[in-house]
Image: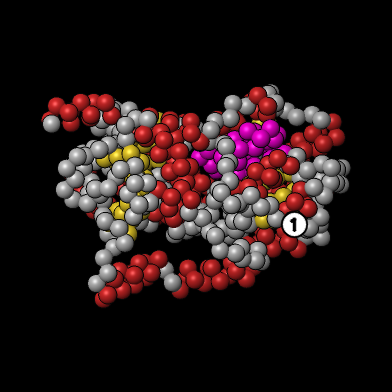
Amino acid sequence: MNTERMGGCSSLGTGRADRELRLLLDCTQTLATPRQSGIPRVVRNIARHGITAAASRGATLVPVRYEDGHFLALDTASAVDVHDVSPRPAAGIGHRVFRRLHKLFVPKKVCRAVRARWRQLLRVPPPRQAIAFGPDDTLLLADSSWTSRYWHVVDAARRVGTRIGVVQYDFIPHTHPELVPQRLAPAFRDWMINTLSRADFVAAISETVAGEARQELRRMGRDPDGAAPLVRSFRLGADVKPLAGEGTVRTELRAFLTASPVGPYLTVGTIEPRKNQAVLPTVFELVWRQVPDARLLVAGFVGWNGDEFIRQLRSHPRYGTHLMHFADLSDAELVHAYRHARGLVFPSRAEGYGLPIVEALSHGVRVFASDIAAHREVGGPWCTYFAPHDAAGLAGQIVRWERDGAFAAEQPPRTFPAPSWQQAVEQLLAIAFSDASDVSHRRERRQAAA
């Protein structure tokens, strides 16, 4: 491990003589996926921008992952730059079937057990030294680790004074179990109870989610007047910055974006029932009756129950000319799509934030968003809103914009105060370091003890 790149964090095992304030960022699930959207995007940006933000507070950010019963420190570059560098698979049904068969017949638990047993047989130690937690540490559970069973390690860390924080993205598997895979709802509830019962602070990605977190804490008996953790919200960043070497935009994407003087409408997000993309073919059938040249670009990984929508999309007679789907846009390609989009259509039925809304507005793109609380919060007067299942209402808004230039939002996109990821991470760290464990206070205590 390159300890120099870890900001001087060279003593990670037992017996650290000169403790320093550390923010330990869980990146376990992000490191296991090549996806560049959703929670992995947030975790990567916390790692990327958190190094500077932590240093300004006299602290060190250490990306970690849970493996073989321990949290292990990572080289900073591993969390910041991890991405799939293998050739892109074909976007057809075949590779998705293979991926699902692999998940079915090779569960993660089996993989972990085999890896651990193999190390025992070969007497190979874990690849990095396990983190030794202390009173100057904060463990930030910022990843989608719904199925991780690391609570015995978290409890041991709490006993020696380590603070536990959680980034709360939403409560959708708990409040809308019909919108997620059946197995996810109980796993998420278990994770929710385990995190909220241990958390010293909760950093929610919107005030909508913060309000839900306070409600859940009250149900658990952690009343604000008692031993409740600090609950605050922060805004996610909107500045999508491609990684080094990701500047290439595929020819077929360029061709679709520039096939007409007017760019296509864009929708961004994992293809799944919660994102509600299934309403869009009906919407555009209505739009084409009056605006035959309108086009739609669907960008998103095919997730749970998304295969049927993609089959319908790809079998549509207008596919390739007026409709197109890309499952694996890089950050560079996503930026290119935003820059050429006529508008963003975001029809989700439930969200904790709605990051594509903020990204699109930051690129000056007009946004048609479903009328839910989180979207109203992040999109404010810069979006126009429609009921999630009102295909005719959304089609009417698009037609009025195309034919008459009428857009119902109160404010134009160019006036939107786009947040940066650096600002977002600064807000997150302000939450993490906002109580009696302030850096300067800890530093004075250490100096006095010396």
At a point 32% along the width and 28% down the height, the residue shown is 434
- First to last magenta residue range: 343-370
Q: Taking the image as drawn, is residue 212 in sight?
A: no
Q: Taking the image as drawn, is residue 250 in sight?
A: yes
Q: Residue 395 versus residue 262: which sits nearer the camera?
A: 262
Give the image's coloring scheme: secondary structure
Q: Position of residue 336 (x, y in %)?
A: 68, 45
Q: Which residue is mark 1?
A: 252
Give the structural element (helix, strand or loop) at label 1: helix
Farthest residue, direction left: 449
Q: Amino acid at mark 1?
A: Glu
Q: Position of residue 287 (x, y in %)?
A: 81, 44
At a point 55% along the width and 43% down the height, the residue shown is 350
**Residue 241 in the figure: left or right of residue 62:** right
Q: Is residue 182 above or below residue 225?
A: below
The reply to whether the magenta stretch includes residue 346 is: yes
Q: Residue 224 versus residue 126: which sits nearer the camera?
A: 126
At a point 64% along the width and 49% down the height, the residue shown is 247
The reply to whether the magenta stretch includes residue 194 is: no
Farthest residue, direction bottom: 121
Q: Position of residue 321 (x, y in %)?
A: 81, 55
Q: Quadrant of the N terminus?
A: bottom left
Q: Quadrant of residue 362?
A: top right
